[in-house]
Image (cartoon, grey):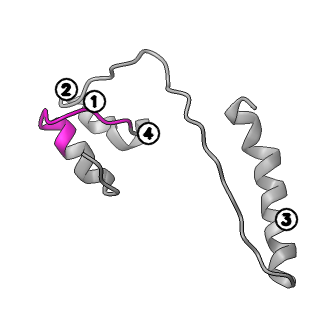
Amino acid sequence: MISNDLDALIHFAAAGLGITMMPDFMVEEEVADGRLVRLTKERAAVVTEVFAVTSEGRAESQLRVLSDFLIERVRPTLGR
């Protein structure tokens, strides 16, 4: 099943209709009460790409500040 509705994917997985990969915080309750079980012992490494499209002008400089911040703070957590 392919869906952009994460709650639906959690519901279907908990009903035994498949598996899904979700952030821990989204399935804490389901794991705690046994409706879902973790299939891996470690967190899965997920490749994430982020792209920004801008136009020239003020928004470009504001986006540069945000992207610099994300590169500084987020990139180290991704192991790159």
Mark 3 or mark 4, which has the lower sequence index?
A: 4
Mark 1 or mark 3, which has the lower sequence index?
A: 1
Image quadrant in which the N terminus is located: top left
Toward the bottom, the furthest residue is 57
Q: In this view, does 22 lie to the left or right of 72?
A: left
| Residue labelled with disc 1 | 31
| Residue labelled with disc 2 | 34
How far apart are the two marked residues, 3 and 2, measured between alpha carbons? 43 Å
Mark 1 or mark 4, which has the lower sequence index?
A: 4
Q: List x then y, in percent, for residue 80.
A: 75, 32
| Residue labelled with disc 3 | 65
Mark 4 or mark 2, which has the lower sequence index?
A: 4
Q: Magenta region: which residues?
A: 12-21
Q: Do the residues labelled 2 and 1 touch (CB within 8 Å)?
A: yes
Q: Which of 30 and 71 is in front in this view?
A: 71
Q: Residue at x 71, y 29 (%)?
A: 79
Q: Is residue 69 left or right of residue 43?
A: right
